[in-house]
Amino acid sequence: MNTNVNNRRLHSRRGVAPIIATLLLVAIAVVGGAIVFAYSQNFFSSSQVSGKPNIESLKVIGYDGRDITTGMFNHNSQAITSTTGGVADNLKSSGEYVTAYLKNDSVQTVTLGEVRLGGATYNYVAAPTALTAGTFGVFAGTALITSPVAEIQPGQTATIVMDLSENMKIGRDVQFKITTTNGAVFVGTVVMGQQSG
């Protein structure tokens, strides 16, 4: 009989079902990809932080802890005070000045919250109030900042002048710590009797 010929004819024809199944699988994959794409776009757009970044960067570029009677100078060797507040006696006495030179490398204004030198905390004094023992002022160029808060503008180099609240021996390494109002901490070291930067 011709069963072989009939069998060959049945197997040589393609059915419609495999083509429809393939199209359905492609359609499901496209719809699934679109759903994942839409979900991820929504997730990433809603998780972005709004506002400006709050990164603060202060660079300590030097200090002046010399035991001299002549004036204090900023980082460009311009006089900012006519006296250091004391005498040259191989001791940095209470009431004498120590300076630190800081550069604001941030893109925003940095506000100093706390200044510590050798364990003592110093309070900010705005111009025209004179510095007294245990206080500090901020000089921009040769002028004392008159702002009610100790601010350093972006890109600005400022001189922090601290009026010592305790006696410190010449040659002593003293750590100073500056904390901003946002909580960033910057640390440096002053060697009493020396200048750097």
Image (tube, rainbow, N blue to C red):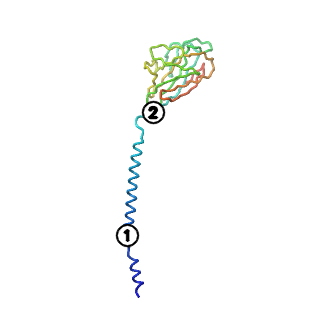
User: In this figure, which residue is indicated by the disc labeled 2?
Assistant: 54
The residue type indicated by label 1 comes to: Ala
* Quadrant that contains the C terminus: top right
Within-10-Å neighbours for mark 1: few <14, some 14–19, many 20+ = few
| Residue 94 position within the rendered picture, expressed as x and y whole percent measured from the top left | 58, 14
- Distance, label 2 to label 1, CA atoms, is 61 Å
Instruction: Give whichever of 83, 125 is nearer the camera.
Output: 125
Q: Using residue 62 as the reference point, say whether residue 172 is left or right of it.
A: right
Q: Residue at x 39, y 78 (%)?
A: 10
Residue sticking out furthest to the bottom: 1
Q: In which quarter of the view is residue 192 placed?
A: top right
Is 64 in front, or is 129? 129
Of 70 and 126, which appears nearest the observer?
A: 126
Q: Position of residue 57 (x, y in %)?
A: 49, 31
> Residue shown at 53%/22% (left/top)?
115
> Which residue occupies 51% across, 29% down?
59
Indicate which disc, 2 or 1, sits on the residue closer to the N terminus: 1
* Label 2 with label 1: CB-CB less than 8 Å: no
Residue labelled with disc 1: 17
Quadrant for the N terminus in the image: bottom left
Amino acid at the residue labelled 2: Asn
Percent coordinates x, y for residue 14 in the rendering: 38, 73
Question: Neighbour class for label 2 at 10 Å: few (<14), some, many (≥20)?
Answer: few
